[in-house]
Amino acid sequence: MDNALFNRTLEFLLLPPGNLLLLFLLLIALYPLLKTRPGLLSLLLGLGLLQVMVLSLPATSAWLMDSLEQQYPPQYELWNRQHPLPEAIVVPGAGRNLNAPEYGGQTTSLSGLERLRYAALLHRATGLPILVSGGQPLPDTPSEAELMAHILEHEFQVPVRWREGESHTTWQNALLTDRMLAEDGIRSAWIVTQAWHMPRSLQVFRQQSLTYYPASTSFSSSIPWSELHMRWVPQQTALGRSLLALHEWMGLIWYRLRARFQACSGC
């Protein structure tokens, strides 16, 4: 799984609220020193709480999300704006809902549904074939690719030509998708994903052999109750958006470092 579990655990511990646990453990380890310096103890506790307050502000979450979404914003009727058109549509996996009894057990996530809806729209407008990409995190469960293909074919009545069911990260999505499309003679494709996820997706997809173009969806830097003075009132929704944006920025930095490391290894 390309250390996906380790990477996600590390991320959760570096971002709030996980890093509050690390701060708590640090305070315990340094307590003999800190008990003689109450000012330093108060400062560390205050910084830990302040980060949560700042990230919970709609103004902060809008700024963080906007910094990602403005790089490749969605475009109305994209197929009329790009010439020539690419040769395929790629939909990377976006996780799954593990408990969906009304759908027989599992289905794709809400983010995945947004991607599939837009991919179906692009297909109907252009007739381009679709590839879905996403692996199988646990044994005896359907891959994300299978879940997405089922929704496209049975709910949107849109055919799926390729199913890439081995990847577990955006990096693997790009690597395995590129290989599958190249073997079928495809030379270019749209990447369908959220506007906030597009910078990281294109960063890794454009390191592959095919030519990839953005097909962004779900512009979501704004949230309800974020106008006027409400921009400065801490909110749970804003905290979630801020953490999502920080996850993407951390991924961008990590993928950039990884690409440089691989380039140096090949020297």
Image (cartoon, rainbow, N blue to C red):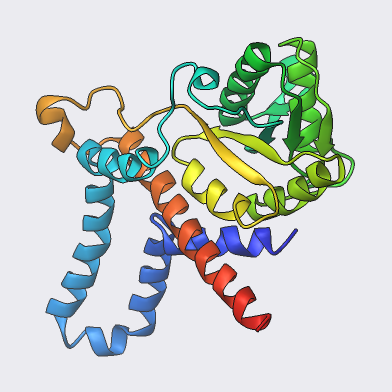
Where 199 sits versus 162, above or below? below
**Residue 180 versus residue 231: which sits nearer the camera?**
180
Any part of residue 97 in sight: no
Which residue does the image show at 75% across and 33% down from the upper left?
131
Quarter of image, res 86: top right
Quarter of the image for the C terminus: give it.
bottom right
Please give the name of the residue rendered at 24% of the width and 44% of the height, measured from the top-left corner.
60
Q: Is residue 226 left or right of residue 114?
A: left
**Is 195 rendered above or below residue 170?**
above
Residue 219: where, in percent of width, then height?
40, 28
Question: 267 or 141: nearer the eye?
Answer: 267
In this view, which residue lies farthest toward the left? 229
Q: To which quarter of the image does residue 265 belong?
A: bottom right
The picture quadrant where one finds residue 155 is top right
Q: Residue at x 53, y 53 (%)?
A: 203
Q: Nearer the viewer, residue 216 or 155?
A: 216
Q: Is residue 235 positioned above or below 170 on the image?
A: above
Asked whether, in this view, residue 11 is left or right of residue 52, the answer is: right
Where does residue 73 sit, x and y in percent of width and height? 40, 32
Residue 2 appears in view: yes
Image quadrant containing the N terminus: bottom right
Residue 67 placement (x, y as % from top left): 32, 45
Percent x, y for residue 82?
A: 52, 27
